[in-house]
Image: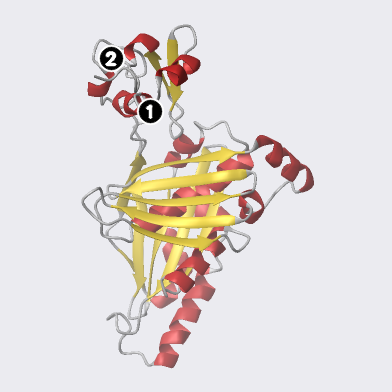
Amino acid sequence: MIDPTSSPATPAFLNHDRPPVPDIVVPRGVLPFHLEEQPVRGRLVRLGALADALLGRHSQHPTVLKLMGEALALTAALATALKYKGSFSLQAKGNGPVTMLLADCTDGGALRGTAKVDAEKLDALLAEHPQPSAKQLLGDGYLAFTCDQGPDMDRYQGIVAIEGDSLASMTGAYFENSEQLKSQVWLACGRSLSGWRASALVIERVAADGGIGAALDSEAHEEAWRTAQILASTVTPAELLDDALTPDQLLHRLFHAEGVAAAGARALSFGCRCSRARLASVLESFGQEDLDHMAEAGAITMTCEFCAVDFRFDRAEVRGQAGRA
């Protein structure tokens, strides 16, 4: 197989081969569940070794990687709650050290993420706060949730100001205020001897007319939701990240008294979608002078911001704007 990161004989615009990235699939990465006869449903996300494959390729500070891991787990949880064809993304932009945070997941479970960092701001923050919150890392800005089903479909996007100390609280506030959906989120990301791990637990209150729990009166409906919140809040980061504790075991530990039922697990995979063809199309949008400035020793190197793979293009092969017929 020809290495797509080098300059092969095949023209770049025809080379759609994936770069040499980990071929990792977590068969039960997302486990949906509901509480029997209760107005509560949710999803438990366990990225497992996929978290290490995604985060380990980025040369960011561990504090930034932890935030990225939480964003990846959260995006997987939210994406698999929707019925769509395309991609679902979470993007945060602010004036803090992490100027941009992005994670997206396709309808098939292909997951990827990246972050842009102002190194000077991050050093200054860490000097004062060794373990900064998500709010301190992101600063003031916005959080956007986008469902993109391709050019032939309308793109749905919800935007909210960054509020709350954690990514979990920011998301809960968004859904309660923007979607009129009561939900609560727990996120965890950390590095162990096995590498990076990331997880998410999301519970949602089903509307009274949604079928589940329809026989309950309003007071019982509210009490069932409060009970689910109390039980879910007992989960610890250690439990969420423990490879030895299976998703089914964790859900049983949390909700067995309420009759938890899980079904329809979803797979997650390493989801970078870069190729020489994609990056070549980006280079072709630049003018000749810009391309000359990018070139070193007769070649232009582009690094995919998601998988950190370097793609090398011979400068003579890149036509650019002025070189088009």
Q: Looking at the picture, does residue 226 appear above or below residue 189?
A: below
Q: Secondary structure at mark 1?
A: loop
Considering depth in this image, is 86 or 24 the residue closer to the camera? 86
Instruction: Check the image and name the residue furthest to the right.
Output: 128
Q: Looking at the picture, does residue 135 appear above or below residue 55?
A: below
Can residue 245 be seen at all in this image of the molecule?
A: no
Can residue 46 be seen at all in this image of the molecule?
A: yes
Residue 11 coordinates in the image, percent (x, y): 25, 16
Residue 312 coordinates in the image, percent (x, y): 40, 16
Quadrant, the N terminus: top left
Residue depicted at 41% across the width and 86% down the height: 221
Q: Is residue 166 left or right of residue 156?
A: right
Q: Residues within 10 Å of mark 1 (few under 14, many from 20)?
A: some
Q: Looking at the picture, does residue 51 appear above or below residue 7?
A: below
Residue depicted at 34% across the width and 41% down the height: 269
Considering depth in this image, is 241 or 156 the residue closer to the camera? 156
- What's the mark number on residue 21? 1
- What's the mark number on residue 212? none
Cα separation between marks 1 and 2 = 14 Å
Instruction: Check the image and name the residue furthest to the top.
Output: 297
Dot placed on the residue nearer the N-terminal end, 1 or 2: 2
Q: How many marks?
A: 2
Residue type of the residue flagged with mark 2: Ile
Residue type of the residue flagged with mark 1: Val
Q: Residues within 10 Å of mark 2 (few under 14, many from 20)?
A: few
Considering depth in this image, is 318 or 83 the residue closer to the camera? 318
Residue 285 coordinates in the image, percent (x, y): 36, 28
Residue 243 coordinates in the image, percent (x, y): 47, 47
Q: Is residue 184 left or right of residue 43?
A: right
Q: Secondary structure at mark 2?
A: loop
**Mark 2 = which residue?**
2
Quadrant, the C terminus: top left
